[in-house]
Image (cartoon, rainbow, N blue to C red):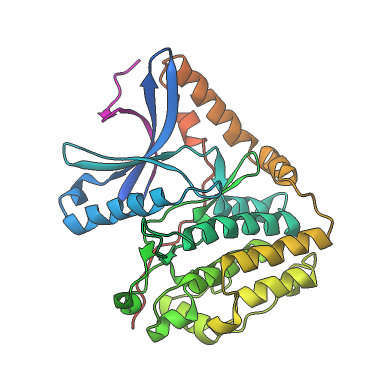
Amino acid sequence: MTAPRRLGKYELVAKIGEGGMAEVHLARQRGPRKFLKLVVLKLVHSKLASKPALAEALLDEARIAALVKHPNVVDIYDLGEEKGNYFIAMEYLEGESLAAILKASRTGPRLDPFSTARIIADCATGLHAAHELRDLKGDPLELVHQDVTPGNVIVLYTGQVKLVDFGVAKVRTSEDAALVKGKAGYLAPELFDGTAADRRSDVWALGVVLWESLVLRRLFAAKSEEETFERIRTGPIDPPSRFALAVTKDLDDVCMKALARNPTLRYQSARAMQDDLLAVLRHANWSSDSEPIARYMRTTFATQIAARQEVLRNLAAREDPRPEAIERMSAHDEDVAPVTPPQ
């Protein structure tokens, strides 16, 4: 087997993704008695590692995300530096992004509205845990994720949901009002007026994700960022049932309350939104477990599951995985670039 590149105690297996700031690698940690643990390493681009502000942004993600210990939030294991290369070691997730699921639903079997509601409810649970973080003195940190999008919601093949990527998350301070971070189509309208992001702006973003997951199209799609911002401020927001007849009125109501432009009329917490979503599921007598979601995932992403199993067998046998198997490990979704809107 080819000698792998090492970063600290981790061996890089294959590059599985790349963003503006970092590469994403599948890696493993070996130990005595055939101990083997797979992790995902986010490695800052070498050309950016010499820029303190960018390196600090990656470190911030690790520090913030590591504080959140919840079944619906990705686990951060380690933060390291090796010869100037900064990296984060995090939980290896066997699943697909909600963005990939929505893409698959447009051309194949569609995720049903109640499965969608369950996914968003679970995401809201993890989001609330992040919002409720306290420091060692017991004071609220007022953490805001600021990047709740379909690409940052991972649905495991078991049906479990994980919120990921705290790369632009921020402990809220009074100096943050002028800083608008996130992705264009998911920014809350009050942010354009100089209001600092708080948990309600994350609720808005989760409302956009719910709407798009039910309707299978972008809510504020436009030809330019400026037009997107204008639609967020003043454009019509129709109930999802206008485009998806299977959506019930009570699910419509949850979505539209999350999308109230006035933050005081919106859900004041992700927990409140979660509670109403679970009430929708109870009213529909929908299964209380995640098995319907797991069945959908196993059927829709059978190719990806088989590829992951092949790669795991290779690694257990100390063999190099085939590039084709690495390529098929995850379904491709549609990336949405982050922006900083004009003030």
Q: Is residue 1 left or right of residue 96?
A: left
User: Magenta residues?
Assistant: 1-17
Asked if residue 185 shows in the view, the reply is no
**Residue 183 appears in which quarter of the rendering?**
bottom left
The residue nearer to you, when weighing 191 against 176, is: 176
Determine the residue located farthest toward the front in the rendered image. Answer: 137
**Residue 34 appears in which quarter of the rendering?**
top left
Q: Is residue 9 magenta?
A: yes
Q: Is residue 29 magenta?
A: no
The residue nearer to you, when weighing 160 against 43, is: 160
Q: Is residue 130 left or right of residue 49?
A: right
Q: Is residue 207 above or below residue 58?
A: below
The residue nearer to you, when weighing 268 against 238, is: 268
**Residue 124 appears in which quarter of the rendering?**
bottom right
On the rendered image, what quadrant is the N terminus found in?
A: top left
Query: Which residue shows up at 17% across the image and 55% down it?
Result: 52
Q: Is residue 253 above or below residue 120?
A: below
* Relative image position of residue 185 (x, y in whole percent): 49, 71
On the rendered image, what quadrant is the C terminus found in?
A: bottom left
* Relative image position of residue 176 (x, y in whole percent): 32, 75
